[in-house]
Image (spheres, helix red, strand yellow):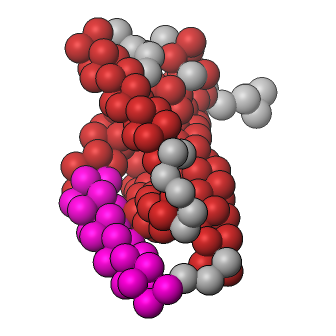
């Protein structure tokens, strides 16, 4: 007679799936929060009224950013690496599994080169944010809208990968 508890191997597999899912969902949530914040500023710029030149800049920048960052960078390069890192969590300690989104972003982990690249990338993003904050209206909103669109593409791409990653 069994106690109804899953076997140790089954329990471990469940924890591994949960850590992988937590990594991907956590990173998607970070993207979602950024989309909400940046998209709100972009929509405010649009609602404030744009000249024909500013509309053209908004459309061009958004299309450019969605393709270069959303498709080429996120969808084809960065997110496949995120999925591999997330699946690698099954071989890591419980600490790294709890910090799964940070592990997925390469901000914590055993490979110091990967972690250094993660922190350098984060520093570059923060620097870009500080620069764009200095842009006058409506240009900050135009840039924020394009970035939000690219991040939304990335977020959807991450969410599409979750079912296959947690099998």
Q: Give me the residue at 32% from left, 64% from top.
A: 65
Residue 134 x, y percent position in the rendering = 51, 45
Q: Would you place residue 107 above or below residue 130 in this image?
A: above
Q: Quadrant of the N terminus?
A: top right
Q: Would you place residue 54 above or below residue 40 in this image?
A: below
Q: Give me the residue at 33% from left, 49% from top.
A: 79
Residue 69 x, y percent position in the rendering = 30, 58
Residue 56 x, y percent position in the rendering = 37, 84
Q: Residue furthest bottom?
A: 52
Q: Main secondary structure of the magenta part?
A: helix
Given residues 136 and 117, the one toward you in this image is 136
Query: Is residue 113 left or right of 146 when viewed as pictured?
Result: left
Q: Residue furthest right?
A: 3
Q: Does the magenta segment cover residue 59? A: yes
Picture quadrant of residue 143: bottom left
Given residues 125 and 87, the one toward you in this image is 125
Query: Is residue 47 left or right of 30 when viewed as pictured?
Result: right
Given residues 75 and 149, the one toward you in this image is 149
Q: Give me the residue at 46% from left, 33% from top.
A: 126
Q: Does the magenta segment cover residue 114? A: no
> Does residue 79 appear anywhere in the picture?
yes
Picture quadrant of residue 18: top right
Picture quadrant of residue 105: top left
> Does residue 163 appear anywhere in the picture?
no
Q: Give me the residue at 40% from left, 26% from top.
A: 123
Q: Would you place residue 58 above or below residue 15 in this image?
A: below
Q: Which residues are magenta?
A: 51-75
Query: Is residue 149 left or right of 77 when viewed as pictured?
Result: right
Q: Would you place residue 103 above or below residue 42 in this image?
A: above
């Amino acid at each position: 007679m069994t106690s109804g508890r899953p076997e140790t191997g089954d329990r471990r597999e469940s924890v591994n799936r949960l850590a992988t899912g937590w990594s991907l969902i956590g990173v998607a949530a970070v993207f979602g929060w950024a989309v909400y914040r940046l998209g709100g500023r972009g929509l405010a710029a649009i609602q404030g009224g744009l000249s024909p030149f500013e509309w053209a800049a908004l459309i061009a920048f958004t299309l450019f950013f969605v393709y270069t960052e959303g498709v080429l960078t996120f969808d084809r390069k960065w997110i496949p690496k995120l999925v591999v890192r997330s699946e690698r969590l099954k071989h890591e300690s419980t600490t790294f599994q709890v910090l799964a989104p940070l592990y997925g972003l390469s901000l914590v982990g055993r490979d110091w080169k990967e972690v250094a690249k993660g922190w350098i990338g984060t520093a570059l993003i923060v620097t870009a944010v500080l620069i764009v904050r200095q842009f006058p209206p409506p240009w900050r909103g135009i840039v924020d809208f394009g970035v939000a669109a690219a991040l939304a593409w990335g977020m959807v791409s991450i969410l599409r990968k979750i079912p296959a990653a947690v099998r």
